[in-house]
Image: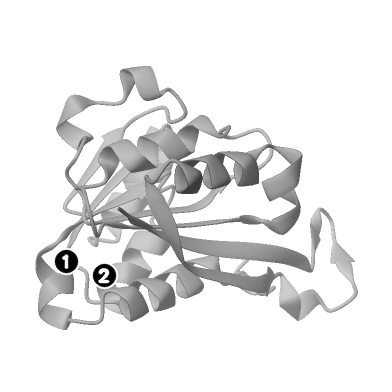
Amino acid sequence: MYLTIGYHDHEKVNEIARELIPDQATREVIEVLDMGCGTGLVGDQLFKVGGFKNIFGVDASVEMMAKAKAKESYKQTIELWLGKPETFPKNLRNRFRLVVCCAVLVEGHCDKKLFDEMVMAAKGRGTIIIFSTRDQYLRDYGYQKRMDELEANGTWKLAKSLLTHKYDKLGDQNLGRYKKTEVRICAYEIL
């Protein structure tokens, strides 16, 4: 339903990924981690529209990952509870050239520790990390503070920030819990 009322995060993440990794040959070979892949909306967009071919998805919900796997856009899906850097799997560390995380930094899902896991998954200098969150959550949940700390300590630098809207087809109307909402899509480059 959310797609019919104007959910665009997955499309925007893909657009930014293609912009920051413009070479198609590179997109076909690098490994991508979709953190909190859910039903595979982002991975499917990256695979079919973005040309990324080596996508790995992690999520806590086996049922949702079954839907992601059915899309045939993922090389592998792995059950994983995010937000616990101390237990982040060694085989996922220092591995991925693109890390995406869409609709996970939300109320009740993961706290700012998720940023540490994103960095752990990154394959060093030049890795791109792209994530989406509601603009208000940057302040409300300390996300912006952690993002700024990682920039100040030389871990990453902001490559792109885009303020957009989700559920924009609703206009000024509400549909249950859905209403037009500001969303921030951020892309950082590992230094």
Q: Which amino acid is tagged 1?
A: Lys
| Horizontal and vertical percent position of residue 12 | 49, 73
Q: Which residue is drawn at 24% across and 26% down?
A: 89
| Horizontal and vertical percent position of residue 121 | 27, 41
| Horizontal and vertical percent position of residue 132 | 55, 57
Q: Residue at x 21, y 69 (%)?
A: 52
Q: Is 82 located above or below residue 107 in the figure?
A: above
Q: What residue did someone put label 1 on?
A: 53
The tag on residue 27 is none
| Horizontal and vertical percent position of residue 81 | 41, 27
The local crowd at label 1, few if under 14, some if 14 to 19, many if 20 or more residues have their Cα within 10 Å, is: many
Res 45 seen here: yes
Q: Residue at x 15, y 31 (%)?
A: 91
Q: What residue did someone put label 2 on?
A: 47
The local crowd at label 2, few if under 14, some if 14 to 19, many if 20 or more residues have their Cα within 10 Å, is: many
Q: In which quarter of the image is residue 46?
A: bottom left
Q: Quadrant of residue 106?
A: top right
Q: Nearer the viewer, residue 86 or 102?
A: 86
Q: Is 52 left, or right, of 9 in this rendering?
A: left
Q: Which amino acid is tagged 2?
A: Phe
For the residues labelled 2 and 1, the Cα–Cα distance comes to: 6 Å
Q: Residue at x 64, y 74 (%)?
A: 4
Q: Quadrant for the N terminus, please.
A: bottom right
Q: Is 109 located above or below residue 25 in the figure?
A: above
2 and 1 marks in contact (CB < 8 Å)? yes
